[in-house]
Amino acid sequence: MAVTGLVLIAFLLMHMIGNLKMFIPVYVNEVGETVNEFNHYAEFLKQDLLYPILPKGVFIWIFRLVILACLVLHIYSAVTLWLRANRATASKYTVKKTIKQSFSSKWMRWGGILLALLLTWHLIQFTIVPTLAGDHDPRSLVIAAFQQPLFVAIYVAMMLVVYLHLAHGFGSAFMTLGANTSPKAERVLRVIAHWVAALILVGFVAMPFSVLAGVIN
């Protein structure tokens, strides 16, 4: 669960950096060519990454399968650990009431379920539907979607769930892998987890809010 979680966090950071290319306006270069950095990034991921080592368009499917495998393993690990915890504590001990838990740690399971549903919606909207429709202009698609306040609200809700999930999960992953060597190390990991979660939250919501406000057009 820790390893797959960190792989997914790395994916989120990469995805966030790609999304921020929406802030680069479309421009005409010195030879008169129209340059669209966001579309170029999308095309590079789908067609050109690792080409000519791999044929065009192959890497993106390998990448998608790896991310899908990490998601499935992450969910499987979460369910398995939850069932083991229930079997290990069949009776409710009074002392459990004194254990301090952050809101994000209490929210992890339900947040994970909600995040899976929101992620499915996100994939349908920005990947599956455009692919079936043959839409090859990602920038226009993103702008059209986030000019609608409802879509922005749903997207921001999704990223708030991601923030809560990462605020607990990032630090917990490193603790599981052995980085929790002292009380000080645990505090440092928790602070870093909140900073990473906040960075991803701000990095992702900046673009839809800017489209809605007309800053990105």
Image (cartoon, grey):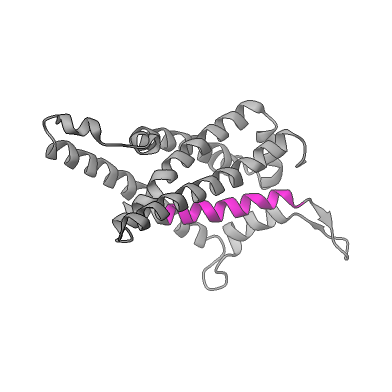
Q: Position of residue 26 (x, y in %)?
A: 79, 51
Q: Is residue 187 above or below residue 56?
A: above
Question: Which residue lies most toward the bottom here?
Answer: 53
The answer to whether residue 29 is left or right of residue 43 is: right
> Residue drawn at (47%, 47%), measured in percent from left and top?
194
> Residue drawn at (55%, 43%), measured in percent from left and top?
201
Q: Position of residue 21 (x, y in %)?
A: 68, 53
> Residue drawn at (17%, 36%), measured in percent from left and top?
86
> Residue drawn at (61%, 26%), measured in percent from left and top?
150
Q: Is residue 4 above or below residue 90?
A: below
51 or 24: nearer the viewer: 24
Q: Is residue 98 above or below residue 61?
A: above
Q: Which residues lie in the magenta part?
A: 7-24
The answer to whether residue 8 is left or right of residue 155 is: left
68 or 188: nearer the viewer: 188
Q: Is residue 9 magenta?
A: yes
